[in-house]
Image (cartoon, rainbow, N blue to C red):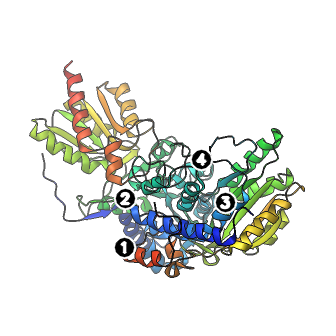
């Protein structure tokens, strides 16, 4: 198992804030909008340097999406910011009609996704957003795994033409990817090469997959770990190449197993290469209040859960 | 009056103590507008509302209350506990794993007193209207109360509801706005000004009254007066001015305390200003 270390922990939303600031410096068409959550979205640096390119819309997410769609008509590249729940479910038809169907260059940037939002509880912890967004034709869906990758992804989507959903989170987590990485939309990142099982992880679950990989190595299981940061378009080739070698797969996401990354992988494999698969994901449930660590553990999203899923799927492969 | 103003003020003091202790206990949550709305909740549950504490979802024959700005759950939970819906010891579990006292109110854990989830802003007025329509169909002439945040009024759904209620003569509805002038990113006037709310609601066909939400006498009288206005073809809007953080001097009037928990030192400072009248949980 390749050794991954980190010297600091940061929140992915701060990676978004830093990436937005950089994208703003590079391209004066980049504009930002927020619905009364500037601090939570870490937009302060952008607002300080480009006050005239920032729009505070108030607590009015539907209006924000519509305004963003309209601004693209004048050549702007709008980045909207609010929590993941209010970025998706709250404004689904506004996104569907004015952004996705109209093919507008809006970047929907969503913080506090998943259980790790913590104490605010289920009203704010969306576990369905990846599914909602990946179902929209033409929507690119990205869920980066640490501060550096989120920063790189934010800069990359500014250069991509078309609607994008960028999902990130609140908790501080290890920073372990390359600070100077070039982010390629739709291109999987090989975290660790292995032969016994393919672990496919996205977002906060990538570090957990690395922790699981280390435990599995101690048990004599050689895991291949792939980071799928772009859920749509899916890197079919990377997944198929790996699964051909390993013969079984575990998908890991901080999301409902209904509609998430795991189902996208299953759809690919059933048509191309039927393969035993296990899902590390929430199981058709809402979240609840608690600390992020307590919730990840209660809902089965820890490294131990990945280890168990790997042992189970390897058993199915032999059977 | 069921209680004297002094008795109500004593209850409010205890509720305020609970609020700061609850958010301190889990180092999260929203003290500012909880404190600002404490006098309203006390007046409502101990003086105005016709309600039973052996809770049923339908609440037939009872007045119902809906909290749209669900983030101020601490004040509601404490009020419900002191009113007798559940034991006050449960307040210690606020926002902790497995608690019925979720960060935002929910029916999912079956906490007595809660009839709908809230927290995602802008939905409560519609729900209150729906409950009022159902009561009307049932021949039940009880009142429906709702509380909304002022920043929350930026959500368009409120204005869909505001248009619907007068047109459909939903006239047993008394909606109050927590008019504290603050929201997360700053004063509401700087984020997205609401301007003349009274004129706006009146133009939509509401009967608007103004109350001082941090003066117990005024809020009790205001809510009683609002009740006398019902049944006359118009929904009632109570534009209730409050101060964010009311009762804790260093929190007063600042959006910084919208969603920040006090540290140990700040907790002690707050509790020193709030007499323990009914016993801490
Ligand atoms: C739909 C939605 N958007 C955003 C939020 C995040 N949020 C929670 S409270 C709040 C500010 C509410 O302002 P106001 O109603 O004035 O309440 P106060 O600040 O007085 O407590 C925001 C933006 C939310 N809970 N729901």
The chain ID associated with circle 4 is A
Q: Which residue is mark 3?
A: B46
- Give the residue drawn at x 25%, y 35%: A241
Is B177 located above or below residue B64 in the figure? Answer: below
Q: Position of residue A206 (x, y in %)?
A: 28, 48
- Out of A197 and B278, give the one closest to the viewer: B278
Is B59 located above or below residue A180 in the figure? Answer: above
The chain ID associated with circle 2 is A
Q: CA distance from mark 2 to mark 1?
A: 40 Å
Q: Do badges 1 and 4 share one subunit?
A: no
Q: Which residue is mark 4?
A: A101
The chain ID associated with circle 1 is B
Numbered marks: total: 4
Q: Do badges 1 and 3 share one subunit?
A: yes
Under tag 4, what secondary structure? helix
Under tag 2, what secondary structure? helix
- Examine the image and state in which quarter residue A268 appears: top left
Q: Is residue B47 visible?
A: yes
Circle 4 packing at 10 Å, graded few (<14), some (14-19), many (20+), is some
Indicate which disc residue A153 carries. Answer: 2
Indicate which disc residue B264 carries. Answer: 1
Mark 1 near mark 3, Cβ–Cβ under 8 Å? no
Q: Say which label, 2 or 4, has the lower sequence index.
A: 4
User: Nearer the viewer's eye, disc 1 or disc 3?
Assistant: 3
Q: Position of residue B192 (x, y in %)?
A: 64, 72
Q: CA distance from mark 1 to mark 4?
A: 52 Å
């Amino acid at each position: 198992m390749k050794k991954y270390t980190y010297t600091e922990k940061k929140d992915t939303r701060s990676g978004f804030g830093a990436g937005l600031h950089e994208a703003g410096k590079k391209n004066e068409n980049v504009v930002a909008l927020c619905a009364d959550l500037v601090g939570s979205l870490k937009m302060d640096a952008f607002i300080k340097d480009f006050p005239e390119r920032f729009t505070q819309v108030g607590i009015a997410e539907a209006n924000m999406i519509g305004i963003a769609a309209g601004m693209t008509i004048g050549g702007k590249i709008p980045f909207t910011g609010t929590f993941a729940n209010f970025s998706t479910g709250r404004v689904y038809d506004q996104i569907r009609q004015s952004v996705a169907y109209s093919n507008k260059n809006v970047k929907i940037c969503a913080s506090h996704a998943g259980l790790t939002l913590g104490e605010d509880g289920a009203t704010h912890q969306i576990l369905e957003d990846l599914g909602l967004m990946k179902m929209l034709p033409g929507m690119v869906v990205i869920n980066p795994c640490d501060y550096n990758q989120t920063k790189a992804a934010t800069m990359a989507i500014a250069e991509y033409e078309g609607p994008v959903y960028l999902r990130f989170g609140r908790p501080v987590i290890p920073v372990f990817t390359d600070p100077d990485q070039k982010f390629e939309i739709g291109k999987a990142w090989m975290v660790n090469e292995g032969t016994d099982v393919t672990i496919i992880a996205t977002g906060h679950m990538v570090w957990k997959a690395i922790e699981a990989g280390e435990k599995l190595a101690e048990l004599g299981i050689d895991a291949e770990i792939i980071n799928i940061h772009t859920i749509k378009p899916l890197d079919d080739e990377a997944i198929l190449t790996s699964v051909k070698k390993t013969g079984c797969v575990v998908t890991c996401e901080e999301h409902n197993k209904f509609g998430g990354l795991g189902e996208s992988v299953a759809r690919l494999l059933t048509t191309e290469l039927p393969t035993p698969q296990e899902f590390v994901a929430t199981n058709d449930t809402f979240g609840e209040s608690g600390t992020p660590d307590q919730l990840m553990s209660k809902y089965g999203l820890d490294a131990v859960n990945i280890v168990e899923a790997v042992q189970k799927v390897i058993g199915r492969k032999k059977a | 009056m069921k209680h004297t103003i002094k008795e109500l003020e004593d209850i409010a003091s205890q509720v305020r103590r609970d609020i700061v202790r609850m958010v301190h206990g889990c180092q999260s949550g929203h003290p500012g507008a909880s404190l600002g709305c404490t006098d309203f909740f006390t007046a409502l549950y101990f003086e105005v509302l016709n309600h039973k504490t052996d809770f049923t979802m339908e609440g037939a024959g009872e007045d119902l209350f809906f909290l749209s700005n669900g983030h101020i759950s601490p004040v509601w939970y404490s009020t419900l506990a002191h009113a007798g819906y559940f034991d006050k010891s449960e307040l210690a579990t606020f926002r902790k794993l497995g608690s019925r006292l979720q960060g935002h109110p929910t029916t999912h854990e079956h906490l007595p007193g809660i009839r709908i989830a809230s927290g995602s802003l802008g939905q409560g007025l519609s729900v209150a209207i729906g409950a009022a329509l159902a009561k009307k169909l049932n021949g039940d002439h009880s009142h429906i109360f709702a509380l909304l945040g002022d920043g929350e009024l930026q959500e368009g759904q409120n204005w869909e509801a505001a248009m619907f209620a007068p047109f459909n003569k939903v006239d047993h509805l008394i909606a109050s706005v927590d008019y504290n002038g603050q929201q997360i990113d700053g004063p509401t006037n700087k984020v997205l000004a609401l301007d003349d709310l009274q004129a706006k609601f009146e133009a939509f066909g509401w009967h608007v009254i103004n109350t001082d939400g941090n003066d117990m006498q005024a809020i009790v009288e205001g809510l009683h007066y609002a009740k006398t206005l019902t049944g006359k073809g118009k929904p009632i809007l109570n534009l209730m001015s409050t101060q964010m953080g009311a009762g804790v001097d260093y929190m007063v009037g600042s959006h910084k305390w919208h969603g920040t928990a006090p540290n140990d030192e700040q907790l002690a400072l707050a509790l020193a200003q709030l007499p323990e009248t009914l016993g801490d949980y």
